[in-house]
Amino acid sequence: MSSIVKIEGNNAHNNLQLFLSRQKFLPIFFFSPYTLNTYLAHNGKNLYIIDYKGEETLIMVKEKPKEVRFLFNNPSVHMKEKVFEHFRPIYAAVNEVIDMPKEAAAINMPEIELFLPPIANLAYKDIRKKYNQCKRKHPNLCFEQYDSRDVEKIRLFVEKWNIARGEKTEKFVNSKNDLHFFELYNYNPEIIGGVVMDGNEIVSISFSVPGLNGSLISAINKCLRGYTELGVFTYVERARFLCDKGFNRVYIGPVNNDFKKQFLQNAIFHDVYSYELHKASNFKSSEWHLLNFF
């Protein structure tokens, strides 16, 4: 018996939740129905649950060009053959596994688990200095809990963020993901979010979603340019907000920019591996392509 089930429609989130509940927990950004559904099931990408010969796996299929990414588990030879036969990809890889593969050259891109109390309490000298700089320069800024009525203001914020970031292709994809998140989860009571207000205007957003181990996953964080240390101010205020709600840690994904590096004292690093399975002779790939599958 075998089945190939596309994850789509109103039941997508619940189907992903059920699949993940059957897997070994992974302390990573994408081990959540919220992040999977937001980032990997739209804009030319689709998710499928494959059940074959008693083995179950989740794959992402990118339509143009045809790519397949096996997620969370190293597939068996039989599973690879089944997926390749059905989808006929020109490129295939395994992403988001925490066990180093024995027979492949893998790239490790660790993901970070942050402890929130030291950030909330300004325990780190550099963070405290930058936070206070922001407070002095912009005393009118305030962090507020997200309300679903803010969604139109957030759309305006994303438009302004796009313009300020310049003509980089990847940032348009990123903002599409953000807008898709609000389309899916705007009214979901489990979403924990905050916005930084400058008068009646949103200048920063921060949203977290429930993890499967009682923790949180930091799904979206964005700031407008033009403010001194607004990112640090947002991180500190978010940490205080989340601590007040009873959380003391959050998964933030890999360290893919210099901003995150300043918060890594006392952080936990989780090894996450990716490796190529197949590519057509005329397909050009790179380490960046392997790691940036979303």
Image (tube, rainbow, N blue to C red):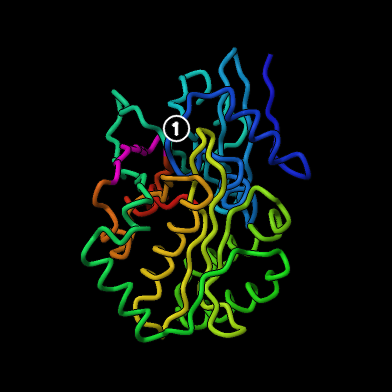
Specify the amino acid type for callout 1: Leu
Residue 186 image offset from top left, x and y in percent: 70, 59
What residue lies at 68% left-to-right and 28% top-to-bottom? Answer: 4
Residue 101: percent from left, percent from top: 32, 27
- In the displayed structure, does residue 246 sit left or right of residue 63? left
Q: Is residue 246 left or right of residue 188?
A: left
Which residue does the numbered mark 1 point to in the structure image? 26
Q: Which residues are magenta?
A: 267-278
User: In front: 3, or 147?
Assistant: 147
Position of 46 relative to 154 (above/below): above
The residue carrying pointer 1 sits among few (fewer than 14), some (14 to 19) or many (20 or more) residues within 10 Å by Cα, namely: some
Up/down of 134 relative to 82, above or below:
below
What residue do we see at 56% from left, 17% from top? 55
Using the image as rendered, state which of residue 180 and residue 288 is in the foreground.
180
Percent of width and height locating residue 131: 33, 72
Q: Of helix, strand and loop, which one carries label 1? A: loop
Q: Is residue 276 magenta?
A: yes
Q: Residue at x 60, y 46 (%)?
A: 34
